[in-house]
Image: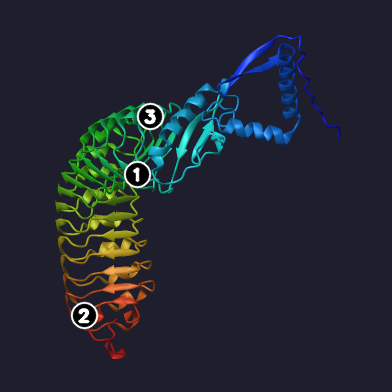
Amino acid sequence: MRHLVIRSRSARPDCPTVARKGNGRDRKGLSLPGIITAWGLVVLVALVLAASPAAAGSAAAVLADTPSCDNGIVVPAPEKNAGLVRDCDTLMAAKDQLRGTANLNWGYHLAITDWQGVTVDGSPGRVIELRLRNLRLDGNIPTQLGSLPKLVHLGLTKNRLSGSIPTQLKNLTQLQGLNLSDNRLSGNIPTQLKNLTNLQTMHLGQNRLSGNIPPQLKNLTNLHTLHLNNNRLSGSIPTQLKNLTNLQTLHLANNQLSGNIPTQLKNLTNLQKLRLDSNRLSGSIPTQLKNLTKLQALRLENNRLSGNIPTQLKNLTKLQTLRLENNRLSGNIPTQLKNLTKLQTLRLDGNRLSGNIPTQLKNLTKLQTLRLDGNRLSGNIPTQLKNLTKLRALHLENNQLSGSIPTQLGQLTKLEKLYVSGNKLTGCIPASLQDVAKNDFEAAGLPPCQPSQELE
């Protein structure tokens, strides 16, 4: 390999010189021809750098040390991607407040397309997604995130973020998904979120949010999922939610909501899951819920609901889960529940229900869990329950049931739990049930049946 040798020439005595100062003393500088020669040297060095990968790497390192999003490293061809440069500036301004003591690899040394959780798309490119799940971020949500105009998804779930939800997020008008769940966020739900009219999913659950549910959320008519569960929300459920006719999931459980269940929820005919459990709701179960014929799960347990179980629930033929336990419901168990043939879980325990156990429950052949305990039910245990061959758990304890335990229940070969104590039962425990793994036979005070005692 030939080596390029650069030799400098001394300035001639007869050439003009340029005086330079250094360390407080005058000294002679380069002559004019010397300056010209020096510039030639710079050009030659540049050519060498261009020809040498190692030298080019050194030059790139210098660029990477430049604290700017237009250094050519973070955003390629920054002069053609001014929007992406602005997005980069926004994220860098937000980085420290967002991460807190956690680590994020965002920096001027790395292409933005390689930044954690950042998705760039489009031509010219823009930041369209920010997904930072479970990274132990323990800062706040920066207001700067409201300056990402092309953002389609913002996901910060399962971190330790605290503080309030910035009102500036209202500017993210192209946002389709907002997931801030499972953090330590506090304060009210900003009414300004009503601007996010393209939003399809909103997950704000499992935080420490307080105050009322903003009626302004009625504007979000494209929503199909709304999760506000496990917060400290209070007040009534806004009737204005009836506008969200595309909703498939409404999850408001584990708050401090009070008042009645709005009859206007009947408008949400696309609902598949309705969870209002573990609040302070009172009044009766609206008969209008019969309109929600696509419901697969209806959970109203752990409230203060009273009155009868509406017979109109028979219309909800797609229900797989019906949980009404731990309320103040009274009256009989409706025989019309026999229509709910897809039910896998039926829980009516912890109420004030009376009368007999309907024999019509035999139609619910997909049931795996049936809990009727803690009521005021009377009469015999129906032999027809033998039809529930998929049953794994049967709770009948703490009622006023009488008679003996039907031997036919021995046909429930998948039964793992059987509780019957706290009733007025007589007789003995059929041999076919004595091997049920979890039971309260001893508390029931019933001895095992001998072969001669088995009832047909």
Is residue 256 in view?
yes
Q: In the image, is residue 113 above or below residue 445?
A: above
Q: Nearer the viewer, residue 445 or 219?
A: 219
Q: On the rendered image, what quadrant is the N terminus found in?
A: top right
Q: Report which residue position mark 1 lands on.
A: 161
398 horizontally vs 46: left or right: left
Task: Report the Cα–Cα distance between label 2 and label 3.
Answer: 61 Å
For disc 2, the neighbor class at 10 Å (few under 14, some 14 to 19, many from 20) is few
36 horizontally vs 127: left or right: right
The amino acid marked with disc number 1 is Leu
Q: Closer to the camera: disc 2 or disc 3?
A: 3
Sequence-first disc among 2 and 1: 1
Q: In the image, is residue 418 above or below residue 284?
A: below
Image coordinates for residue 192, horizontal then vertical, percent: 29, 29
Image coordinates for residue 205, horizontal then vertical, percent: 31, 45
The amino acid marked with disc number 3 is Gly
For label 1, the SS is loop
Q: Report which residue position mark 2 lands on.
A: 443
Sequence-first disc among 3 and 1: 3
Image coordinates for residue 433, horizontal then vertical, percent: 32, 79
Q: Report which residue position mark 3 lands on.
A: 146
Q: On the rendered image, what quadrant is the C terminus found in?
A: bottom left
Q: Residue at x 75, y 33 (%)?
A: 52
